[in-house]
Image (tube, grey):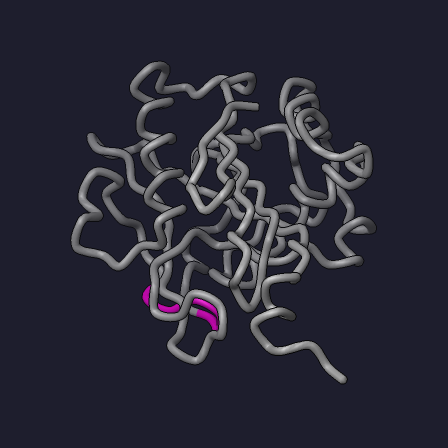
């Protein structure tokens, strides 16, 4: 006999995922690239999020030109299971860039440059959700990338894709974790606008029914 639906959902194992926070710092107040998930999505419908999604098996084989910064790679390898290898860490970064391309149309060089990606947060979807992800949030600045901004547009995954003032998002429907990560980014940039690669990484998860934030 199959287990009850609520029991099956509670036992859902988080899958690797990655998001890319793209910041435009050419204006007085920094802007962040976000889009709205469609109402048909099973997971987090009708909310504004960063481009991102589940890591695919093929992400391990995607080409890259320049590797992750040493400090970023060290952070990705620390504070997690022994299954986290340099190859898996790179696959997460490559997944973030792939999702950006698929969800917003932005494309860079054929061989990805991972060296400009910061690692700013990690979050595990709480138990009880129909889908659960162990998401690593990467960040880079638009002026550090080769993306052709004229290609920016909506996709089947994200609608109303646009640049938003990072300090003026109160009117948007945002997931709790997105709000928390945005606050982290604002605090990090307030401390150092260049956002060094070795900055502390916030780790969000549920423990005994409570939303917990720790540091990696």
Instruction: Identify which residue, 10 or 33, lies in the foreground.
Output: 10
Quarter residue 83 falls in: top right
Q: In the visual, does 93 lie left or right of 35?
A: right
**Is 135 placed above or below 76 here?**
below
**Is 83 placed above or below 72 here?**
below
The answer to whether one can see residue 97 in this image is no
| Residue drawn at (42%, 59%) of the image | 152
Q: In the visual, does 195 lie left or right of 191?
A: right
Percent coordinates x, y for residue 108 in the rendering: 59, 48
Percent coordinates x, y for residue 49 in the rendering: 40, 55
| Residue drawn at (56%, 63%) of the image | 102
The quadrant the N terminus occupies is bottom right
Instruction: Identify which residue, 120 or 116, lies in the foreground.
Output: 120
Q: How many marks?
A: 0
The quadrant the C terminus occupies is top right
Percent coordinates x, y for residue 127 in the rendering: 55, 56
Percent coordinates x, y for residue 113 in the rendering: 65, 36
* 42 falls in the magenta region: no
Instruction: Identify which residue, 42 or 150, lies in the foreground.
Output: 42
* 159 falls in the magenta region: yes
| Residue drawn at (61%, 48%) of the image | 134
Residue extending furthest front?
Answer: 1
| Residue drawn at (69%, 26%) of the image | 73
Magenta-colored span: 155-160
The answer to whether one can see residue 103 in this image is yes
């Amino acid at each position: 006999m199959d287990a009850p639906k609520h029991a099956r959902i509670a036992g859902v194992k988080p899958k690797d995922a990655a998001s890319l926070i793209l910041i435009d710092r050419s204006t007085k107040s920094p802007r962040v690239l976000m889009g709205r998930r469609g109402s048909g999505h099973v997971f987090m419908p009708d909310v504004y999020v960063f481009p991102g999604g589940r890591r695919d098996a093929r992400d391990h084989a995607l080409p890259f030109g320049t590797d992750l910064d040493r400090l970023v790679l060290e952070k990705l390898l620390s504070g997690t299971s022994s299954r986290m290898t340099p190859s898996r860490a790179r696959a997460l970064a490559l997944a973030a860039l792939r999702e950006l391309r698929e969800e917003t149309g932005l494309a860079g060089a054929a061989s990805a440059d991972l060296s400009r990606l910061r690692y700013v947060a990690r979050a595990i979807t709480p138990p009880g959700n129909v889908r659960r992800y162990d998401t690593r949030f990467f960040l880079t600045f638009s002026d550090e990338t080769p993306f052709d901004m004229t290609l920016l547009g909506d996709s089947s995954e994200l609608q109303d894709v646009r640049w938003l003032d990072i300090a003026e998002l109160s009117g948007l429907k945002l997931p709790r974790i997105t709000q928390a990560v945005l606050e982290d980014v604002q605090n990090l940039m307030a401390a150092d606008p260049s956002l060094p690669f070795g900055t502390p990484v916030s780790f969000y998860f549920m423990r005994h029914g409570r939303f917990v934030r720790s540091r990696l």
